[in-house]
Amino acid sequence: MPSFPLPLLGFAAHSGTGKTTLLKQLIPLLKETGLQLGVIKHAHHQVEVDHPGKDSYELRKAGAGQVLLASSRHWALMVDEVQEHEPALPELLQRLDCSRLDLVLVEGFRHLTFPKIELHRGSLNRPLLFPDDRSIIAIASDGGLDRETELPLLNLNNPPEIADFIQDYCARFRVN
């Protein structure tokens, strides 16, 4: 993974662990501290952000390869590309405007090497990821672990505790 000018932190977990739910809780907590956040979410399925019947959808389906939809509060660029492979995280990171961000959170891409917090729910009976992934820097769990680790153990049900860890992570990044 090439270097990136901002703190980059992923959330790695098996499907159904609650990555999106946690991010929806963390984002407002981190915003309250003044952090400007970017988020990249990987989807394993076809994604349609525009909807049939909307002008931008109809223009894109008529053949426009790129449609930029803008209002006074938002803008979105939709690009139709036929690729043989999933987009790579480094490619996606290059598309962000880093001058407007302090931190980028990543949901997915768990098999890549970059700093991640593992989310673990014992009730799902899924194996832990950290023993095989040295880029995991902490574990957020809803209970104890069935093995020893020197990694920080966070309470998955306590988003403010996880937000504090992320703020410390960002502070350490700025020092280095």
Image: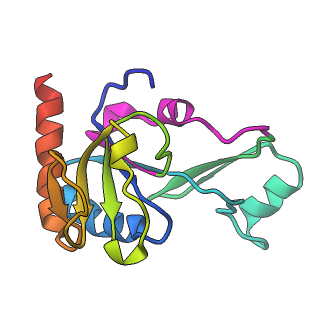
Q: Percent from the top left, x then y, of residue 90?
A: 51, 30
- For image coordinates 33% across by 47% down, the residue present is 130
Q: Is residue 108 visible?
A: yes
153 relative position to 83: left or right: left
Q: Percent from the top left, x then y, of residue 13?
A: 42, 58
The answer to whether 39 is drawn above or below residue 92 in the figure is below
Q: Is residue 34 visible?
A: no
The answer to whether 97 is drawn above or below residue 23 in the figure is above
Q: Return the residue nearer the eye: 118 or 107.
A: 118
Residue 154 inside the magenta-drawn segment: no
Quarter that holds the C terminus? top left
- For image coordinates 64% across by 62% down, the residue present is 49
- For image coordinates 47% across by 62% down, the residue present is 14
- For image coordinates 81% across by 56% down, the residue present is 59
Q: Which residues are magenta?
A: 83-107
Q: Return the residue nearer the eye: 163 or 58.
A: 163
Quarter that holds the N terminus? top left
